[in-house]
Image (spheres, grey):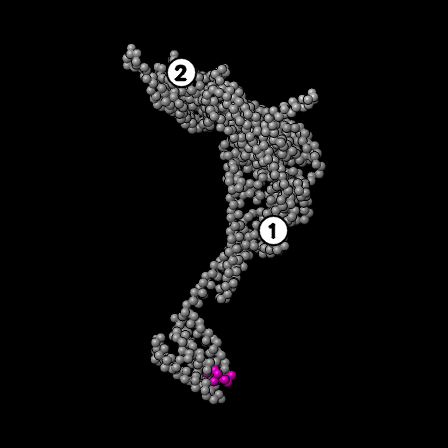
Amino acid sequence: MTGRRVGILIVALLFLGLPPRAARSNTSGSGKLSITAKLDPDQIAPGETATLTVEVQSEGLNLPDVPLPALSGVGVERAGTVQNFSILNGRVSRTSTTEYRLIPRGEGVVTIPPLRVAVGGDRAETAPLTLTVSHTVTPRAPAPLRGALPPGAAPAGTPEIFVKATVDHPRVYWNQQVTLRLRLYSRVDVIGDVDWKPPSTDGFWTEGLGPARQGRQIVNGKEYAVMEIPTALFPTRTGTLTIGSAQVRCRVARVIQPPDPWSMLAMPDVVPQDVSIHTDPIAVAVEPLPSGAPAGFGGAVGDFRLAFHVDSLTARAGEPAAARVTIAGTGNVATIRDPEIHARGASREYVVGTSTKVDRTGDRLAGQREHDVAFVADQPGTLEILPVHFAWFDPESRSYRSQSTESVIVKVLPGSGGEPRPGVVPGGLAAAAARRSSGPLGTLSLDPPAASAALLGSSIVAFAAAVLTGRTRRRRFRDPRTKRRLALEAILRHHLARASSLAGSREPARAAALAEQAVLSGTGLRYDVELLGLAKAERGEALRSRGASDGEVSAMESLLTALQAIAYAPPETRSSDAKHAIASARRSLERYRKEMET
Amino acid sequence: MRAHVLVAAFAFAASIGHAGTRAEAAALEGRVDAAVLYNAGTRALARGDTGPAVAFLLGAHRVDPRARDIRTNLAIARTRVEESEGSSARGEARVSSAVALSPAESWGAAAALAALGALLLWASAFRPGSRFFPLLGGAAFAAGILWAFGLALRAREEARHPQAVVVAPVLDVSPAPEERPLSPYLLAAGEEVRLGRARGDLVEVRIGGNSIGWTRRSGLWRVTDAARYTENSGSR
């Protein structure tokens, strides 16, 4: 094997030994998505905490959340998330930074597996991290508890356990911070967690100042373990406000000495005991802010600084120039009213966003508030961002203070694309040009036009009426009595009318025969019996069985006899008789019809 | 082709309810010219102002939904919005269907259909015997009423949760008016949402029938109000 071949083999083996880069890349192949993770510190003593910071950056608005996998033997608390976004050439990118507090429960090496994110087809992941927890690591000094009990607040004697609530300022201005400290003093071991029931703080805006702090203090000559929960309170109204009573419940281990101290076998007993103690209410006098507030004062109380930043001093026509105002300091930053930012020469302006970052690590609530505004000039020239003014009340100096920025000139260059283009999108679809003639008129509302509503309403009424009418008519036609009456009316309307016509046209025989048929049919309909084809005696019997009187039967038979006589008599002499008989038949049938109507 | 003829017939039926000359119609309050909205949207699109472009073109599309130029530019504007959001699926712009009626035309056609059904039923009530006319009338009336019911539901949804378009470059949405978002939901210019309750300068934002949080009202334009804005209207 030559030396060159050996070199190639070594290089190949080195490549094979390396982990695949794509699998461990913290940036996706397209470069649109990236994730980084940092552990600080990576070596701690038992009982200490480490901070894991995860930062995800993504092009576009889709920013995935990073689920932290369960870590055995480690408690994980999400400390907070800060998000930011930027717009460059109309494209948005977002960044999210999340902090986790890792609290190991014992010694050992904790491995944090790769954290993975995915947006669409883009994927990225971090490298695995390790956290070493060992007694050999020098523990960091605990945060000292500041402020002893004020004079008169210390309890009489040296109780084993007690709780105290104190405020740093019993008299404050409106919206000035009051720091409330709830402290649990104990000379006995506290078993398990302490259950804190916070006091009522009506009239205050409340902000917690981080997790509980631990320390030791000497009270009345005895050393106590102290647990403190600090809270920042901001009065939202003036007058005397009361902070209510806080309650603490915990379980302590009491040591009970044996009755005979000389007995060798008598060991002290440790008995768990539930304890419930509470603080006294505290009154805070809140004064209104002094008069003489400067113009633009929006109620900020504390100690603040104003900073102003413009992304670039040049911009192209049609593209945004972003300005950011940052107000940082101590005070209730979440309630600060954003200062007005305006520009001369801007065609449009947009509030891009507002964000608040709060720092709760100290005794004073601090933070910063950022307010972003984008200005767009459509024509080349200059864009003047006017001075920004911010005023606040400083309770330490008991005076109003203000700060202003200088105006900023942004040079607007011609647009990158020259004349505006409607544009072409992927797929070759070209935008349509502007119209030169007017288009159809219409309304943007989705409500019905009055004419349509009227037509619809009348249609509903007409439909309902048609349904009711049709139903009524159908019901009437289904009634047998009505059916017979209608058939009788048809006989009157057609057959007798035809018979009259024939009688008038000198055809009495046909007229009389037709009238005879009509009388038989009509009488049968009246009494609901079929008379056609029956002999005289059978007709009489059938009619009587259906309720006809003897007079009616004989009158009908007389009429039939007369009609039959006319039907078989010579035609030249019987025309007037036929008319007379047909008129009698019509009268009889009309009477029947009226009887059937009732 | 049949669909076009059907749409034209419905449009004609709808125009029955809109008698009057063009000048008279223009004088009526609340009537807007589709061409004016279309031109404003097209110029905003050319400037790269996707938010107002989508708002103006949506307004124009409501008035004249069959116009090819409006549908084309609206599709391009929506594609631009997807691009600015960083959507990974960057396909072709999809132009909406030409078989469409404006809200006023839809209402007119639904009313005409219901009226035709009522007329047929009246005819059948006085001409008993035939079962064809009652069935046809009932079907036409039911179709018209169902259509009108759908339109009424749409109008009610628009009244309760009006359609709006994000005009600010980016809008951050908070979970509640008093809350600072842990993981803010961001809306990009041109996104189409619906609005809910309002509180001060904040308004509830709804997407897909669900509330996603609260944001500044000034960063959104209601489509119904598109005609009130000028091309240089901004957002505060």
Q: Residue at x 70, y 32 (%)?
A: A413
- Is A510 covered by the magenta stretch? yes
Q: Residue at x 50, y 18 (%)?
A: A44
Q: Quadrant of the C terminus of chain A?
A: bottom left
Q: CA distance from mark 2 to mark 1?
A: 82 Å
- The amino acid at mark 1 is Val
- The amino acid at mark 2 is Tyr
Q: Which residue is mark 1?
A: B99
Q: Quadrant of the N terminus of chain A?
A: top right
How many neighbours does mark 1 have within 10 angstroms: few (below 14), some (14-19), or many (20 or more)? few
Instruction: Give the number of the disc on residue A340.
Output: none
> Farthest residue toward the front?
A1
- Is A412 covered by the magenta stretch? no
- x, y (%) of residue A547? 34, 75
- x, y (%) of residue A252? 36, 20
- Compared to residue A321, the image places residue A304 above or below, namely above
Q: Is residue B103 left or right of residue A277?
A: right
Instruction: Give the number of the disc on residue A224.
Output: 2
Would you say the magenta stretch is mainly helix, strand or loop? Answer: helix
Q: Chain of mark 1?
A: B
Q: Are tags 2 and 1 found on a single chain? A: no
Does dot 1 land on a helix, a strand or a loop? loop
> Farthest residue toward the top?
A262
Nearest the camera: A407 or A77?
A: A77
Q: Residue at x 38, y 13 (%)?
A: A222
Q: Chain of mark 2?
A: A
- Compared to residue A474, the image places residue A69 above or below, namely above
Residue A291 visible somewhere in the drawing: no
- Compared to residue B110, the image places residue B233 above or below, namely above
- x, y (%) of residue A573? 47, 89
- Magenta-colored span: A505-512
Residue B92 visible somewhere in the drawing: yes
